Image: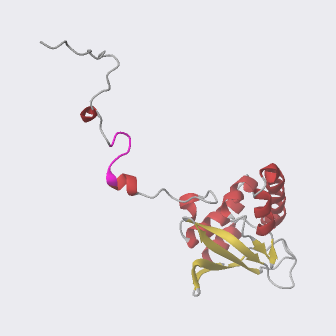
Amino acid sequence: MPAPGPVPDPELAPSPARNIDPTLGLGSKAERRKRPPAIIGGCGAACATPEAAVRFLVDQMQTTHRMEALRSVFDWSLLTVDGKDLGNGWADLWAEPSRHRERAAQIDAWIANWSRWADRVTEPQDWARMASTGIRVRLDPHNPQRAVVQVQHPPLGPAGGAAVWRWVFGLRGDEWLVVAIDHAPGLEAP
């Protein structure tokens, strides 16, 4: 009779593979194949279509926390204002982690300066009028990932007429974000 072999310690023995669920924590195949939404600016579903993004921008202009609210609506790496490329400089600052605070301060200063026009809107109903009749959105026929928006903003004070501006939204990830702003020729930037 041969000598018995060593008996493995049951505490150290690996558990049989047949007891492990291969999908544990992974979900079904369909769930695993779902692509998570690509959020670039941060406005998410509020910017899912060009029309929704325009509404969201106009709504954010009216909030008391406008600075924070507007950060998520712009594509800071591509933004061009009146032909001046601001986004390229901010993209360069983003590439250097030690300069992120500088970039954030520049963006905040730009938002504060640009959005001041909202403080000069004379009547609250002017926002509603602008939203109902003063905005035209159309997709760029040459680039379906661009939407061109004509905005007749509300009168800005007693002497300020209603000017027409152009906002360009670009599809970035799953969001439509502002990539360009053009103010009417001959008018001061707001």
Please say whether residue 28 is one of the residues in the magenta stretch. Answer: yes
Q: Is residue 58 magenta?
A: no
Position of 1 relative to 181 (above/below): above
| Left or right position of 126 against 3 | right
Out of 51 and 102, give the one closest to the viewer. 102
Q: Please say if 76 is above or below 101.
A: below
Q: Residue at x 81, y 49 (%)?
A: 98
Q: Which residues are magenta?
A: 23-29
* Side of 101 relative to 70 (left or right): right
Task: Give the x, y percent position of residue 32.
Answer: 39, 52
| Residue 121 visible to the viewer | no
Secondary structure character of the magenta stretch overall: loop
Give the color scheme: rainbow, by chain, secondary structure or one colour.
secondary structure
Left or right position of 107 against 19? right
Identify which residue, 100 or 115, lies in the foreground. 100
Q: Quadrant of residue 15?
A: top left
Quarter of the image where the N terminus is located: top left
